[in-house]
Image (cartoon, rainbow, N blue to C red):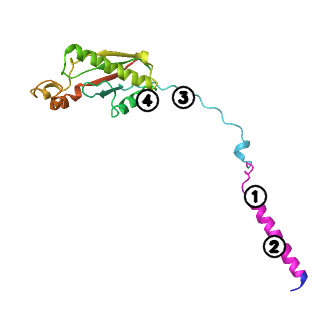
Amino acid sequence: MKPSTRWTIAVVAVIVIAILLLLLFRRGEPEAPAKSVVATQPAAPKAEPAAPVKPMAAEPLSATAYFGYNRTEVRPGEAPKLDDFAAKLKARAYDRIDAIGHTDRIGSDSYNLALSRRRAEAVRAYLAGKGVDAGRVRIDAKGEAEPVTGEACKNMGPENHRNRKLISCLQRDRRVEVKLVARS
């Protein structure tokens, strides 16, 4: 092969490599926006703003948290209900929230009234920890006055802390009902 042919091949190879490198490095650069006919046309007239939509009556917002026998701590299994309530509350206007504590019928009336109040206070504190204004949570205590179990737990033996069958049956009575009182 002649030396001039070798030089020609070398120069062509260098040029091809230079072009490939140039294309490779230019790929990372953003392209300039292309001019279009749409961009040069005059802007369309602005549409009239739509009339505000009247909000529909919001659905009632409530939650019920159940408690262990003779306990006032919010159970881990009940926390998601209150978390959901607090999350939905953020998008709503309201005057107050009612937290109404209840107990089962085991124990004295005065003890159960105090226990139901402590349960309602525990729910208020839990909601406050989730960003709800505790000053707007009104607590009430019903004690054993409003059971939901009805006749289902009658004649189940002695009404004391050792009767596990009765305690289990009365679970739904040990609760705090939380209700949103909306603005009118």
Q: Relative to the observer, which residue lies in front, 130 or 42?
A: 130
Instruction: Indicate which disc residue 50 carries.
Output: 3
The spot of residue 145 in percent (x, y) is 21, 17
**Is 78 located above or below residue 1 in the figure?**
above
Instruction: Indicate which disc residue 41 carries.
Output: none
Mark positioned earlier in the residue sequence (1 or 3):
1
The spot of residue 168 in percent (x, y) is 19, 31
Q: Is residue 160 left or right of residue 98?
A: left
Callout 3 amino acid: Ala
Instruction: Indicate which disc residue 13 carries.
Output: 2
Q: Quadrant of the C terminus?
A: top left
**Is 8 located above or below residue 20 in the figure?**
below
Q: Relative to the observer, which residue lies in front, 64 or 49?
A: 64
Q: Is residue 57 visible?
A: no
Callout 2 amino acid: Ala
Instruction: Work out how far the residue at label 1 is from the one at label 3, CA to CA, in angstroms.
Output: 49 Å
Quadrant of residue 57 within the rendered picture: top left
Give the residue drawn at x 65%, y 33%.
45
Callout 1 amino acid: Phe
Magenta-drawn stretch contains 23: yes
Q: Is residue 82 left or right of residue 38?
A: left
Give the residue drawn at x 72%, y 57%.
27
Tell me the residue that label 4 is attached to. 87
Task: Mark 2 vs mark 3: give the one in front.
Answer: 2
Magenta-drawn stretch contains 81: no
